[in-house]
Amino acid sequence: MTTKEYNQCVDEYADGVYRFILKNLRDEDTAKDVVQDAFAKMWEKRENVDGKKAKSYLFTAAYHTMIDYIRKDRKRDVDDGFLERHCTESNSYSDLKEILDEAIETLPEIQKSVILLRDYEGYSYKEIGDIVELTESQVKVYIFRGRLALKKYIGSMEMVL
Amino acid sequence: MKESINRRNYERFLIDFMDGTLSKEVHAQVMLFLEQNPDLAEELDGLESFCIPDDTLICEDKTRLYKGIESPLLLNEENIEEYFIAYSEGELSKDEKVQVEIFVSQNTHLQADFIAFQNLKVSPLSNHPSMDKDLLQRIAISQTDFITISALDTLCIAYHENDISAQDEQLLLNAVAFSKEVKQVFDLHQKLIFTADQNIEFPNKFALKRKAVYGFTPFNQIFVPAMAAAFALLLMYYIVLPKPSERIDSLQNIPTTLDYTMVTPSEIIENAQVEEIPIEDDNNVVVSTQNKKIRSKNNSLVIANTLPNNERIPNNSIKMERIHVAPFNAISVVDSGYFMVVAPPDQTTFEKAMPRTVTKVGKKISRFFRNEKAAIEAETPQESMKNIAQLALNGFNKMTEGNLSIAALNPTDQVKDTE
């Protein structure tokens, strides 16, 4: 991977990785640290990283760093002001968004991650599996279970709207 | 008048006698009556067996007597564990729980066991498995067909995951069109797709880039500033300093002199461009190059050419940019179309002086024009001189007029070079 390709990765993927980690951790400072750490790892390994697979490498590095962080700090304090700061959409939709945010927090870590990778980045089951070290089938099952749990949490359209 | 005891009313007196409620006087009358009627005394003995003989006895099951307790328990140390389990499993009524708690408080040595049984409580009631009703409840998807809510969920998720067969997709879309209820479930699943908030951006992207580009490695710390300085110098050189003029070999109106015609070419050396020409007095060997338009940008050349060879040579030298080549022994004199290298006047001096001088000049020229050192590694000094002449000639042809000038040599320098 050339320096130019690396810098392109910063431009193209830094925001996406940051959003993914921030959504999982809900802690801006830690999310920044995780993203910086992921890019630092890629820079160190740039000679072995194919520019075309850089995005996958970044998400994989960031995901594992995040998991390490969660394991070390399970009792982390969720940033309560996070939702208020970032829910800037219209009122009619922010209700649903807030409910979804609450709902996804109820999911196990792995289900949350695979759903966010799927929805945020549009990764295939195979790509997600490579990132979180699961088989394609396992990813599919986790996504299915996660969505069912979200639906049950939300309950009904009346509750959403 | 008080009633006296007799065989008709004695029973009332006997009951009060057993209860101990009689006055001393009546009690004495009853005692006398019993002595007088021994058959009734036996009857009294039978009645006394129904009395509680001793008021110091402790009731073994006090809990039965607590106010408000509807179902008193017979708690003791043998059966208390069963009640502990029932307590932790939530199988006791409120009254029964109170009784267990009282029993534990009265028997402090059981408190540890009681707490231990409470800690064995497995899980909250909410986590108890229950039947998923979505597996059973069905919803109409057409006039004749029904599917379970769970199956509908599966189809909706597969659709939004873009992981559905064409047949199932058609089935689902028909069901959505058929039933509002199905459409509600379908729409609900659509709303479960998360979208990233594009307003959220990594706040320190520039820092990531700088770290990547420069890396702050020891090499880059030196190399990058050095490159920047070199670039700035080059920029200054080409912008601030006067631009070099055209290449020498493309100059027009080159002045010609007749001076060199005094030098008779003896033979052509190797090629037409380099000649070895002995001068008249045989003191010097001049190696000249023909047909090369080399000149200086000032008029000193003309002055040089007007002088006799033995004068003009010591009095002029060529400055090739920063390299100054002394005229004596091995020197180049620029004529219009000629490049001359002058050798020492005699062979002894030549052999003695040339190797050192040729090497010195050769190195300078070789370095200056970026040519090979092989140019001066010839068998004889003369050959070296020819090589140098050719080398310099080639080099001069790459130079511009601004790179060359002829200046009068300082006499002191001449002496030094001669020595």
Image (cartoon, coloured by chain):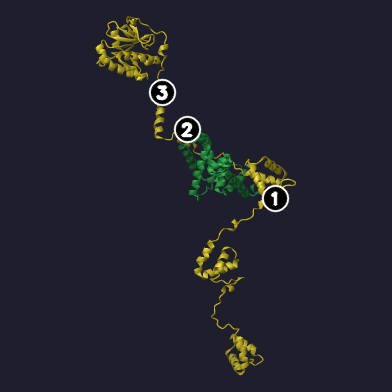
Chain colours: A green, B yellow
Residue B135: percent from left, percent from top:
66, 51
Dividing the picture into quadrants, the one containing residue B390 is top left
Residue B246: percent from left, percent from top:
42, 14
Question: Tag 1, which chain?
Answer: B
Q: In the image, are marks 2 and 1 on the same chain?
A: no
Is B183 drawn above or below residue B210 in the view shown? below
What's the residue type where badge 1 is placed? Arg
Is B357 drawn above or below residue B122 in the view shown? above
What's the residue type where badge 3 is placed? Leu
Residue picked out by circle 3: B234
Residue A38 placement, left or right of B266: right
Residue A100: percent from left, percent from top:
60, 46
Residue picked out by circle 2: A3
Quadrant placement of the N terminus of chain B:
bottom right
**CA–CA distance in space, label 3 to label 1:** 83 Å
Residue picked out by circle 1: B138
Question: Dot 3: what SS?
Answer: helix
The answer to whether residue B213 is visible is yes
Question: Tag 2, which chain?
Answer: A
Label 3 with label 1: CB-CB less than 8 Å:
no
**CA–CA distance in space, label 2 to label 1:** 58 Å
Question: Dot 1: what SS?
Answer: strand
Question: Tag 3, which chain?
Answer: B
What's the residue type where badge 2 is placed? Thr
Label 2 with label 1: CB-CB less than 8 Å:
no
Is B224 drawn above or below residue B399 in the view shown? below
Q: Residues within 10 Å of mark 1 (few under 14, many from 20)?
A: some
